[in-house]
Image (tube, rainbow, N blue to C red):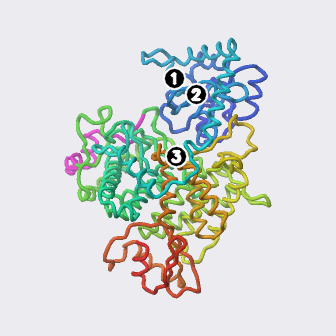
Amino acid sequence: MSNRLAKESSLYLRQHAENPVHWWPWCAEAFAEAKKLNKPVLVSVGYSSCHWCHVMARESFEQAYTAELMNKHFVCIKVDREEKPEVDKLMMDAVQMIQGQGGWPLNCFCLPDGRPFFGGTYFPPEDRGHGQVPWPQLLMRVADFYHSNKNELAANADAIAKNLIHLTVAPDANGLAPTPPDLVEAAQRICENHDDTYGGFGGAPKFPTPSVVDFLLSIRATQAADNNRALATRMDAVITVTLGVMARGGLYDQIGGGFHRYCVDRDWTVPHFEKMLYDNAQLIGTYAEAWSRYRDPLYQVVVEETIEWLNRDMLTESGLFAASLDADTNHYEGTTYIWKPIEIVEALGEQALEFAQAYGITDQGNFEGSNIPKLRGSFKEREKFKTARQKLLNIRQQRPQPSRDDKTLLSWNALVIKNLAKAGWIFGRKDWVKQAARMEEFIWKNMAEENHEGIKLFTTRYKEKSSGEGIMTNYASLAEAELALSAYADWALGVKHTDYIARAEKLMKMVENSFRDPHAVGYFMVSENREDLSVRQKDWFDNAVPAGNSILLHAYAQLEILTAEPASSNHFYDLSKAYGGLVKNVPHGVAHALEALTRQATGWVIIKYKDIHSLDQLHDVITGLDKDSTRARAYRPLHLRQDDSVAGFQICIGKNCLNPTNSTEIAGDYIS
């Protein structure tokens, strides 16, 4: 018999619709039920492609005995963290405060008014000797403690709530914006945490960190880096080693393209096999910008293959991209992606041995007796096996496939728009920019409503239905995507465009009206009318996606030069004061903000042009794609603006405009 989740649109919630647990979706009625029955609330958060979420579901939530305990003692709520990132953040911050760590599945116990008082992540169904309390035993302990020590739990919930409120204050803010030397020092600090042997940052597990690499690339493009050869050399090594090992290792799908979520080991061999849209969206831009500086051909094919994978496996009927691919296939992790030597021989024949040597395929294997391909050969060898990889992909597509979560998330698709446009400019791919423009248009027609009060965004779309009240990150991410399109649309689409900047301004006006804290620096994740959350939080730290306040810095910095409105300038400098302490203490956690501050210090570029037909030649010179160009040119963020009063081109860097020129080569030199 199905529970309440059977009527939900979320794939993750529907995965639990046949559980014997009497699950509720996140709603006011669930908390009202808890108050009426005097029961604590269990909020269980996860997502459809999460391997350990599936494990705990099979071991506990699908079992009649465990479900009976949950139903008897708790009001149980299931939350898709991708649908409701604001709920996920509240519960995650509480659990991290209690346990010192977090993750998914996330299980948080709350009072009937929604205040968390205890929680954790995965719990086994029985004692397995690893120090983890079995889930049934934990349920009984929490239920007993709730009824016998309610006052103590209430005091604990109060303390957690106060600490969560305290976290809304920018940590270590000293009222000063970071200076350029502070930003350079932050880059040095980040480089100190680099794993020089295996690449990446810190130990296992190893995650892709596009925001961190993007920040290092922005610093690398400054005069300060050029003047400090030791720093420049160090950053070159950190960037290229990390991007190289990620592209060659198990994190990257060597056969089908696209990146998995993370690797469980230090040397990037065994991935956690889920594929998330947000990782791939960001890494497209990171590898594209790195290619513009280092011209490593591996970076280019990674971008091309990742976009090809997105369009092959993740594109929905709407033209937007699905959220994720599951880590599991038929309840086993990674089985779609792994290979035994005999399978390579059967597929490739005489070429099998050479392929196996290039990709580390052995009889022993590197994952449960099978092999996750890792590129060990040169790029030239890799290109030789292009046909072989296609043969293996064709065979792999005949295997059972991981399930796809078809919900389309506005913020994640905004990341795709931004980075498709950026990569399209860098590689001269107008088709990528045009695809980004089509995605943006669909969002405005189907995931936004405009009226006299402003713009209302929806977080999620399921086929013909958009739902979920937009949070600040939705508005900020879409604004940043609008500005990325505004930068390159004239070149790619061949017509003058002003809609994108106007839309960005409208979105940022909504941010000011609905999310700004009138009493302290920063912006809340949700508007003040959200009564379902016990704490109204701010998002300061980048995780898998950039923090909302970091994204706002990018948007305000660009609007300041594009519109010359004092308000954008004031908002940028007010918000930048939140990062004076963060840049010194946790630079890796606010890297997206530090990139915005670096770009601002360097000066955003506006290129005024008269004739739209001159943009192709200008593009080729600026990007170094001109066959007659004498040198490669590293990417620098810029905006193209049509201006009939300009003869040829005029370059403005920050608020300083240089003399007009008719020479594309001189214009390129001005901004490189």
Q: Residues within 10 Å of mark 1 (few under 14, many from 20)?
A: many
Q: Which residue is mark 2?
A: 107
The numbered mark, 1 or 2, whose residue comes first in the sequence reads 2
Task: Please indicate, yes or no, whether residue 465 appears anywhere in the rendered image.
Answer: no
**Element assignment for label 2:** strand
Q: Which residue is mark 3?
A: 581
Closer mark to the observer between disc 3 and disc 1: 3
| Dot 2 amino acid type | Asn
Q: Which residue is mark 1?
A: 123
Tell me what residue is drawn at x 28 percent, y 59 percent.
383
Task: Please indicate, yes or no, whether residue 33 appears anywhere in the rendered image.
Answer: yes
**Between marks 1 and 2, how big is the CA–CA gap?**
9 Å
- Is 345 a magenta residue? yes
Magenta-drawn segment: 333-357
Q: Position of residue 614 (x, y in %)?
A: 48, 83
**Between marks 3 and 1, how big is the CA–CA gap?**
37 Å
